[in-house]
Amino acid sequence: MMSIGEFAELTGLSLKALRLYDEQGLLKPASVDPWSRHRRYSASQFEPAIRLKALRAAGVPLADAPRLLVDPPAAGILAEHRARMVAERERQDAALETLDRLLSGEDRHEWQVEERLATRQHWAGVMWPVPGDDDPAADVEGADERVNEAFAALWRALAEAGDTPTGPFWSTFRAASGSDTAIELVCCWPIARPLPAGWSVPGWTVETGTVEAAPELVVRWRFEDPVTVVDGVTHPAVLALLAAAEERGLGVNLSRLRQIGLLEEGESVGMEVAITVSR
């Protein structure tokens, strides 16, 4: 029998790791002295210890360890982990390429921010709660699809009601009621006339309102523009818009920031972002 220190020296596992693996049932000592509580290990435990050492060095989650310590190990676990590592590496490579462009300034863009008077426009929208990063049930990858579903469901319902949208779609973000962290996205279509009270779209929370005639700042871009966009960060054109409002000493209400689709022959080719300002 070997002491925990001797076993740690031979296997390359730390004392802390061995105690953790004991607690989690991954590698329990061959015996434990009932009085001193000293752990003792046997030579037959070298193989599972080395497997643990190797899988941790490879970054395999401990949750997968039990299936790799059995003999024979569960098939497919390493393949799954390798696929996750490849995807993570691709994400890191893409982030590094983005950083290179940001630091070199090779595609730096001077955004043209304009001021105009918004026309009065009725609208109808459906609300969608934006999934947070800390929400374990959040389907971040399916978010775009869900937003497209929202716009499509609203358009169909408006057409059936005889109030077909009169222009391009738009959306706006806002803080959810009673929360400092939750965000809602309102997906909207402009309409010719207000909807009757109680009008609804099955499966969605409907809101209606009117964009009043007021000064607003606007900036636009096409999807084909060579612009560096950092994953998860608002488009740089929007940040330029907000910076321009601040430079002009204008008050900004983010709940009045509208992201409007630029359409050509029915196809979305870019975005226009406008924000109502007050002096």
Image (cartoon, rainbow, N blue to C red):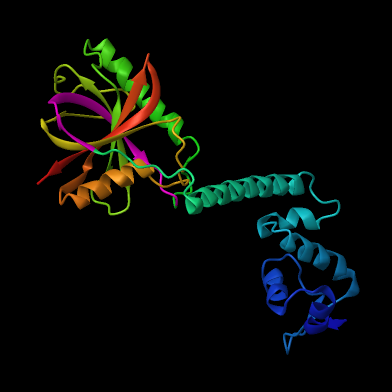
Residue 25, image quadrant: bottom right
Q: Look at the image and tell me whether residue 88 can be seen.
A: yes
264 or 16, which lies in front?
A: 264
- Residue 31 place in picture, x, y as percent: 80, 78
The quarter in which the N terminus is drawn is bottom right
Image: 101 above or below 129: below
Examine the residues drawn in magenta and state their main secondary structure.
strand
- Residue 230 place in picture, x, y as percent: 46, 47
231 or 155, which lies in front?
A: 231
Q: Is residue 86 left or right of residue 194?
A: right
Q: Look at the image and tell me whether residue 175 can be seen.
A: no
- Residue 176 place in picture, x, y as percent: 27, 45
Image: 145 above or below 22: above
Q: Is residue 22 left or right of residue 98?
A: right
106 or 9, which lies in front?
A: 106
Image: 109 above or below 168: below
Q: Is residue 199 left or right of residue 182?
A: left
Q: Is residue 13 magenta?
A: no
Question: Which residues are the magenta region?
Answer: 114-133
Given the current orientation, which residue lies at the most extreme right position? 43
